[in-house]
Amino acid sequence: MLIGVPTETAQGERRVALVPEVVRKLSGRGVEVIVQSGAGAGAIIPDALYEAAGAKVSTDPEAVWSAPLVVKVAPPSDAEVAQLSSGAVLIAFLNPLGSAQATRALAAAGVTAFAMEAIPRISRAQSMDALSSQSNVAGYRAALLGAEHIGRFFPMLMTAAGTIPPAKVLVLGVGVAGLQALATARRLGAQTTGYDVRPEVAEQVGSLGAKWLDLGIEASGEGGYARALTVEEQAEQQQALTEAIKGFDVVITTALVPGRPAPKLVTAEAVEGMKPGSVIVDLAGETGGNCELTTPGQLTVEHDVTIVSPLNIAAEMPEHASQLYARNVQALLELFLDEHGELALDFDDEIVAGSAIVRDGKIVNDAARAVVEAAA
């Protein structure tokens, strides 16, 4: 089996789908890997390390994209899809709930495509869960952004000139990214508080030494995600949050609902009521943002409050983000390859079937099909 690893071309994407560590392990199983020259440059991985791990490095993109199995990070552009061979297998983040055009293009190309974000969130698939691995990176980075832009100390300082109280950090949305943000902010010395509409995560928040903000609204959903709140619940939640937010120095938001715009948790009134110099780090910018005043992808200042909304924040830490992602891909490939290193897809396996978006040119994921039909 030959696996192609192309250079990522999406704006700001610095990650790479496979790292030398994983290439070496695949080579030991008899798998050949061809890497586009410069594919690891954004993650500070030179071509020589890939060659030392047993990969072939090629300056010809066509040679890489023509491989029977291609792995990448970001969803492929239409031009990249056109380079795939008919019948090829693609593994990547594919955004099946947000991009009908990409799904249609993959179907038209006659390929079989697996979305890393569609891998079932079950115990057996934990090692393949790229959403979680990249969310860990995002949460860590979000806490650092908050500390960088606040212009105040995070920890309490007792000095001859007096005592500086610790910064108060609130994390809204306590999934993987939120928990990592809480843990990192606390390591930096901040006083941390977490909030989520799923009350069962309160114990996890407490285990990190953070306080729990209880607003009395519960919205547990399937697959570890929160369900969408009703209009009435959203109004009640926002009213309570608006008052609570005003007491924090840094607010980090991570709330996402798959296939839907990000819920607006931080109102303009809440921003206006925050202390001048406070910071909001909005990790939901790619789906509109959790703050009403967020400008996705930009740093803005509203009412003397800095609002940071990075896009693809995991790519800001490309070395470790790539390493984690590559290990997720490797774990998935363990299901795809037989003992001889050849492709042997078993669609009776719930992970293989669940992560498939397109199979032999046909859309096989119900949710992705609904998105395509709705956009037609």
Image (cartoon, grey):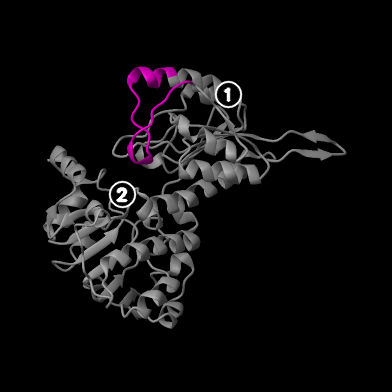
Tag 1: amino acid: Lys
State which quadrant residue 143 falls in: top right
Mark 2 highlights which residue?
Answer: 120
State which quadrant residue 324 falls in: bottom left
State which quadrant residue 284 falls in: top left
Indicate the position of residue 337 as horizontal and vertical percent values: 27, 70
- Is residue 8 at least partly visible in the picture? no
Numbered disc 1: secondary structure = loop
Tag on residue 289?
none
- Is residue 225 at least partly visible in the picture? yes
Say which of marks 1 and 2 sits in front.
2
The residue positioned 37% from the left and 57% from the top of the image is 128
Mark 1 highlights which residue?
Answer: 246
Indicate the position of residue 85 as horizontal and vertical percent values: 16, 69
Indicate the position of residue 76 as horizontal and vertical percent values: 26, 58
Residue 106 covered by magenta stretch: no
Indicate the position of residue 72 as horizontal and vertical percent values: 32, 63
- The residue lying furthest to the right in this view is 160
Residue 223 covered by magenta stretch: yes
The residue positioned 15% from the left and 57% from the top of the image is 359
Quadrant including the N terminus: bottom left
Closer to us: 97 or 311: 97
Quadrant including the C terminus: top left
Q: Residues within 10 Å of mark 1 (few under 14, many from 20)?
A: some
The segment highlighted magenta reads 216-236
The residue positioned 48% from the left and 44% from the top of the image is 177
Where is 295 relative to 119, above or below? Answer: above
